[in-house]
Amino acid sequence: MRKIDALFHEYGLSHQNMTNKLIHWFCVPAIFFSIVGLIFSIPRGPLPELMPFLGNFANWATVVLALVLIYYLMLSTPLTLGMFLFSSLCLAAANFINLYFPGKLWMLSLGIFLLSWVLQFYGHKIEGKKPTFLRDLQFLLIGPAWLMHFIYKKWGFAY
């Protein structure tokens, strides 16, 4: 069994309840975006000079997402493409909010982060099982890929 399949299987064991799954479909992408937004809000420091080709995207969120995508690449090349597209959408949304609502991105992201985690833990209370990331932190990154693999399956793409 491939490592990604084993991780999805283990993650899926604590995500059987339909209400919990539905909560995850909304909250996992929201948490992912909120983390991108929070990291995007960190002052860029020397990054624009070090990475001038990235323009407004020369920020810490881009650096962190590049590392996250390397992790996904070690698990599944096709899933990495989907996560790259989703990550790009998150970066674009963070950039948009930052440009048109200066200084508000971190507040919005923090609110989304807190609300989404409250809902996630409520979903796990309904499920009756603890979140898998409490056993292994890598499951914080498996959650978004787990959802992406369902999209791939629906569209008939190999992951």
Image (spheres, helix red, strand yellow):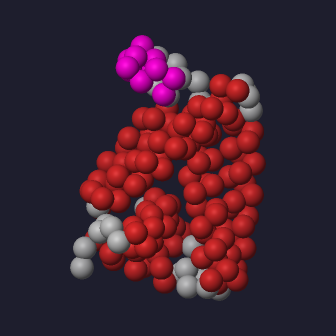
Residue 12 x, y percent position in the rendering: 48, 79
Residue 132 colored in magenta in the image: no
Q: Is residue 75 left or right of residue 58?
A: left
Residue 50 pos. (x, y %): 38, 18
Residue 69 vs 54, above or below: the answer is: below
Quadrant of image for the C terminus: bottom left
Would residue 139 be visible to someone looking at this image?
no
Q: Is residue 28 above or below residue 154?
A: above
- 63 to 147, vertically: above or below: above
Residue furthest to the left? 1
Q: Position of residue 34 (x, y in %)?
A: 63, 47
Residue 149 x/y as whole percent = 41, 68
Tell me which segment is drawn in magenta. 47-57
**Residue at horizontal 43 percent and vertical 48 percent from the top:** 85
- Please name whichever residue, 155 or 11, is drawn nearer the observer in this view of the structure: 155
Quadrant containing the N terminus is bottom left
User: In the figure, is residue 129 to the left or right of 101?
Assistant: left
Q: Is residue 62 left or right of residue 2?
A: right
In this rendering, the answer to whether 159 lies above or below 13 is above
Query: Looking at the image, which residue is at 59% across and 48% down?
Result: 33
Q: Chief secondary structure of the magenta span?
A: helix
Q: Residue furthest front?
A: 155
Q: What residue do we see at 33% from left, 67% from top?
A: 157
Residue 123: in sight, yes or no?
yes
Q: Residue at x 32, y 48 (%)?
A: 70
Count of numbered tags: 0
